Amino acid sequence: MNSRKTLRPRLAAAAASLALLGAPVLAQSAGPAERPAPVPGQSNFQRQQAAQAYATAKLAKTPRRHEWVAIRMGDRTLRAYVTWPQTKAKVPVVIVGHEVFGLTDSTRNTADEIAAMGYITIAPDMLSGLAPNGGGTSALPAGIDPGTMDTLLPSEYANAQFDAWADYAQKLPQSNGKLAIVGLSWSGGAAFRYAAMKHHPSLKVVNVFYDIGPPTSGQFLAKFDPKFPVLPVTGVDVPVYHFIPTLDTRVLNSAPATKAAMDAAGKKYEQIFLEGAEHAFFRVGEDPKNTNQANRAAIAEAMKRLKVILGAM
């Protein structure tokens, strides 16, 4: 399933699709709060970074050690932002996956806040090596939408990256060998699919934030083919916690089918509903321009639940 022979033709198909699309196609809801108004000459990454200045400011003040790291996966270099907890004890590692926009400061800020609970966090750029000159999200030129790139990545390619970072985590001297994933938006769905498919043995729990889960695939070929096979959940062998904002209708409407599939398969699965909160509340709720107090309340509630969930590993 994860062989290069399988990945190459599907990646080629994704690249061909990108060339043919000619316009951004996003699987995630994308309201005005999520997609800043274009500025001529700016890339999507630059627009997102400008809109997330509040997250950049918080990161600049963090007391925790952090660094950019690079690893090899086949012929590509993968990059991630690693944050270390303020303890010398051996601790679990939490992979914090980014939204459909690619790795931006909002996701890095969420990773920092999880590290503050006492975990090593790895925030990978899932577009590493796909931009010109082997770059990632920040190197995508104007006119190329990270959302199009992300949603066209085959699950096998995303899974291979999760595996690569899990291998890296196992080699960290401070790691106790346990791994969790916190997936935000696009990467939440990717993490759920990873749990349902062959995954790294160190994985102990998956936390899915505001994205749909199996049996709906939701990404890659399913975006273009309504008859694309559903993804069975029989392979899920770790607990999955699904954080669902009640104003995120796309995710909310898909929740009953996911629960029915997981319950029928006898899997440990819990849906956590955040009343009145919007899609991407981690990012939107921290924005000083946010007027929906339910988003801030959702951040507090989600962090409270995460502390318990991660602490049970």
Image (cartoon, rainbow, N blue to C red):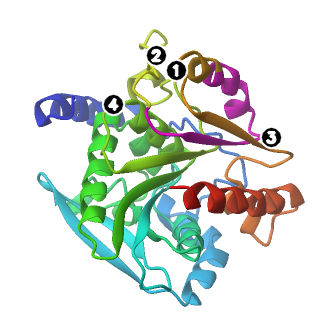
Q: Are marks 1 and 3 in contact (CB under 8 Å)?
A: no
> Under tag 3, what secondary structure?
loop
Three-letter amino acid code at the position of disc 1: Pro
Q: CA distance from mark 4 to mark 3?
A: 31 Å
Three-letter amino acid code at the position of disc 2: Val
Q: Residue at coordinates 37% horizontally, 81% vertically from top-left?
A: 67
Q: Position of residue 70 (x, y in %)?
A: 24, 69
Is 246 contained in the magenta span? yes
The residue carrying mark 1 is: 215
4 or 2: tag closer to the N-terminus: 4
Which quadrant is the N terminus positioned in? Answer: top left
Q: Is residue 37 visible?
A: no
The residue carrying mark 4 is: 17
1 or 3: tag closer to the N-terminus: 1
> Under tag 2, what secondary structure?
loop
Q: Are marks 4 and 2 in contact (CB under 8 Å)?
A: no
The residue carrying mark 2 is: 230
Is 252 contained in the magenta span? yes
The residue carrying mark 3 is: 247
Q: Are marks 4 and 3 in contact (CB under 8 Å)?
A: no
Q: What is the crowding at mark 2: few (fewer than 14 residues within 10 Å), some, or many (at least 20)?
A: few
> Under tag 1, what secondary structure?
loop
Q: Are marks 2 and 1 in contact (CB under 8 Å)?
A: yes
Q: CA distance from mark 1 to mark 4?
A: 24 Å
Q: What is the crowding at mark 4: few (fewer than 14 residues within 10 Å), some, or many (at least 20)?
A: some
4 or 3: tag closer to the N-terminus: 4
Task: Pick whichever, 285 or 240, lies toward us.
Answer: 240
- Residue 175 occupies quadrant: bottom left
Q: CA distance from mark 1 to mark 3?
A: 22 Å
Q: Position of residue 306 (x, y in %)?
A: 63, 58
Three-letter amino acid code at the position of disc 3: Leu
